[in-house]
Amino acid sequence: MAKQGRHEAYEQIMRRYYGFVRLKASSYFLLGGDSDDLLQEGLVGLYKAVRDYRSDRESSFRSFAELCITRQIITAVKTATRNKHTPLNQSISFSHTATADGESEPGLDELLAGPSAHDPVNQVISSEELHSLVACLSTVLSELEATVLSQYLDGRSYDEMAGRIGCDTKTVDNALQRVKRKVGAHLDSRAVAA
């Protein structure tokens, strides 16, 4: 009767097998989920058992329902542990880069070279600009600023730099801000698009 769409019959089957579904679900673990998720999967398996059961076969509904419930739960567990969507769920955005102080910095999409990166003219100009910038920095940066910049380019955190230099993180931050201003002034004087 439940297979024919009688809601009361389906409700009665749900009440009768709910404890069994709960017991079956409690013996499995779903990565990234909880016991209610597995219970729902088991109830989906019970629904499929009602939908697909054929009385002309030699198995009872109880054994067929147990098989459908178990398979549905196992499929959910295997799907959760498959790591199929790991790259989508754990990737980092190129366009939004958060900093420790809450200020926004240019994203990787803005810093990565575009399609004209392999153009020989652009490579020569970039090389000349780099040499000009290095020459300028070697003359305008103080010893502290040069040290902080070097460690910053090595990927050290503010705390690491402060510990190595023997100052506080605010001094490191101020030195980096001065470096940025001096680089910006140099680029503006050369009319280079930053």
Image (cartoon, grey):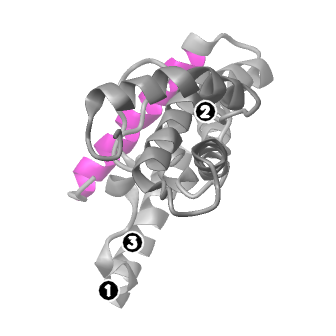
Q: Earlier in the sequence, mark 1 or mark 3?
A: 1
Q: Please report the residue visible at 20 percent of the width from the left and 57 percent of the height from the top.
A: 191
The residue beneath circle 1 is 121
Determine whether, in the image, residue 49 is placed left or right of residue 73. Answer: left
- Local packing at callout 3 (Cα closer than 10 Å; few below 14, some 14-19, many 20+) is few
Q: Residue furthest bottom?
A: 120
Q: Please report the residue visible at 59 percent of the width from the left and 32 percent of the height from the top.
A: 38
Most common SS among magenta residues: helix
Count of marks, rendered view = 3
Quarter of the figure with the N terminus: top left
Are the residues tagged 2 and 3 within 8 Å (C-beta)? Answer: no
Of discs 1 and 2, which sits in the foreground? 2
Q: Give the extent of the magenta segment.
A: 171-190
Q: Nearer the viewer, residue 26 or 121?
A: 26
Picture quarter containing residue 106? top left
Are the residues tagged 1 and 3 within 8 Å (C-beta)? Answer: no
Q: Please report the residue visible at 70 percent of the width from the left and 24 percent of the height from the top.
A: 23
The residue beneath circle 2 is 32
**3D distance between C-alphas at marks 1 and 3:** 9 Å
